[in-house]
Structures are given as structure tokens and as C-alpha cells.
Image (cartoon, rainbow, N blue to C red):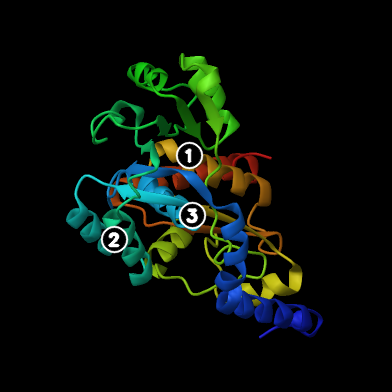
Amino acid sequence: RYSDSSSSEQLQRDAEIEFYSKWGSALRQPIYSLRRINTFALVWNAECTAGQALGFTMEAINILLGLEPLIEVKLEVSNANQCHSELMKIGLPDSTIAAVDRLIDKQLPTELEVVVVSHREPGRYFQFVRGDHYKYYIGRSMFETDRIPPEWVTPCNKLDEIWVPSSFNVETFAASGVERTKLFTVPEPVDTNLFHDGAALGHDPEPESASFLDSLLGLSSRPNSNAKAKASEKKSFYFLSIGKWEPRKGFDLLLKAFLREFRFDPSSSVLLLRTSPSAEYRSIIRGLRDEFEAEKNSSGSPFGS
């Protein structure tokens, strides 16, 4: 499975991963008990859908699963049964869906004051939160462009705090009129049981989409078994992109930048694209291919030098 030079190190990593998976939760419990917050409870009011707001849904779930050992927390959704069905569509593990169901059904201690986080587009902050008995009101959102819609500014300024995932959004929200003193950077969560430097490349669950992109652009969008072996030998660098194929995600810029920088050199890098392009965006990719071919023919290299 591994080359001679790396087998010992990889076997040690595998052992560490196995140990952490088996005993990690028990080892963390004493730390959690020392850091646990007992002065207030948290209600996380969030989207729960497999549709347009899937990104918000997954972020909320991952944040809550990380917070649960540290604070009394409840998930508040518009419709619990619909939420369960939507999560089944996504294909989440049964254990994750069960954890979400538990957080929805949870009853918070009545003696604790409540802080609410509304995890939605700011225009929807006040549409779904139930009651007005909260001690503190926080909004969680994000936006990829250099400004936010004007109608979002007033809802943001009515809240006590606005949590955004990066300093970029601190600047874009503030430049649009949101009070800077309300803006705080709270990065997105990372599941370190899944994403870590010892993780192995698995099989591609969407080979048809990947093959389509391979043939369309003439590049290796995912590693096959031979590519994996060559990557190990030549120390290739892997870039991972996960997201929906829509213009605001900038996948066209990603592909252009990758092709311009590496020029089909498989020993330099591999681009892993985790997505399923729709018919609409496959058409856009074809446009990229035509642009790529024209510039390659005129300059001798993809998208210029």
C-alpha cells in the first residue's frame, strides 16, 4: 500500500487515527467538563434543507456537534419532520441525523438564560425565531461578493452581534453599512476526524461527473489508482474544491488558474473537484473548454503564460 520510505510513518498515522477514533471521545470528556459553560443556554435557529441553503444547513450541524459537549444547546428549525427528510436526501450518516433529531427535541433547563443564533440570510433573521425572551440575539451569515444586499443592513444592525466566517466578510458587511462593532469573525468548523494530514484518498463516489470533466477539459480532475501511485512517488500537491457549480462560487476562475499555473503537468499537482455539475453548468464548462482551446492555440499554453 505504501512505498518503503513512507510505510513506517503512514502505519504510525493509521494507528493514531484508529486510537483517536476509539478513545478520543472519552479522553476529551474531562477537558469538556472543565470548559463547559453553565451560565446560559444556546438556541441555534437554522435552515435545514437539501436545497439552496444546504451550505448553511451543513455548517450549522457541524457547529452544533462541536458545541454540544461545551454548552446546553438546542437546534430550532421550521419543521422537524421536514428537516429529517431533507437530511436523508443528503445521505448523511444515520448517527449524524440522530444527533440532529436529538438536538431538535432537546428541552433546555428553564433556569438558564437563553442566547439565540439565527443562522440564515440576514433578510430572514426575524421570520423564524420563536418568542422574544432571549437574553442576546446573534446573527450568523456570509456572502461571497464585495458588498451585501442593502436590505440586509437594517436586520444586521438590529442584532447584538453578527458572526461571519472571515475577515473578508467583516470588511464587506461593514462597508455596506453594518456597524463594525457588531461584527465578529467566527471561522467555519472543521471535522478533524475526517480532514487531517493522515487521511487517505478514497474512491470517487461520482465517477460519471468526474469523467465528464476529464474528457471535457482534457485534464485529470480526480486521481485514479495510477495517479495516486505516481502522486506518492513524485510528491504531487493536491488541491481540493468542494462546492456547488454556480457562477458565484467562481469555479471558472479556479479552472483557469489551475490550467494557467500547472499546464497539465501531472507530477506537479492534482485538482480534486467534489461536485456534480448540472446540465446548465455543464454548458458553461463547455464554454470554458472552447475558450481554453482558442487561447492554447494562439499562445501555445493554456490561458496564456
Q: Position of residue 132 (x, y in %)?
A: 27, 29
- Depth check: 14 or 264 in front? 14
Q: Position of residue 119 (x, y in %)?
A: 37, 39
Whether residue 248 is situated above or below residue 71 in the rendered picture: above
Q: Earlier in the sequence, mark 2 or mark 1?
A: 2
Q: Position of residue 190 (x, y in %)?
A: 55, 54
Q: Earlier in the sequence, mark 2 or mark 3?
A: 2
Name the residue type under label 3: Leu
- Depth check: 91 or 240 in front? 91
Q: Which mark is residue 101?
A: 2
Marks 2 and 3, how far apart at CA: 42 Å
Q: Which mark is residue 250?
A: 1
- Toward the front, the furthest residue is 111
Alpha-carbon neighbours of circle 2 within 10 Å: few (<14), some, or many (≥20)? some
Quadrant that contains the N terminus: bottom right
Residue beneath label 3, please? 217
Q: Residue at position x 29%, y 54% from top? A: 104
Residue 46 visible within the image: yes
- Depth check: 191 or 209 in front? 191
- Element type where label 1 sits in the image: loop
Name the residue type under label 1: Gly
Marks 3 and 1, how far apart at CA: 17 Å
Picture quarter containing residue 84? bottom left
Marks 2 and 1, how far apart at CA: 34 Å
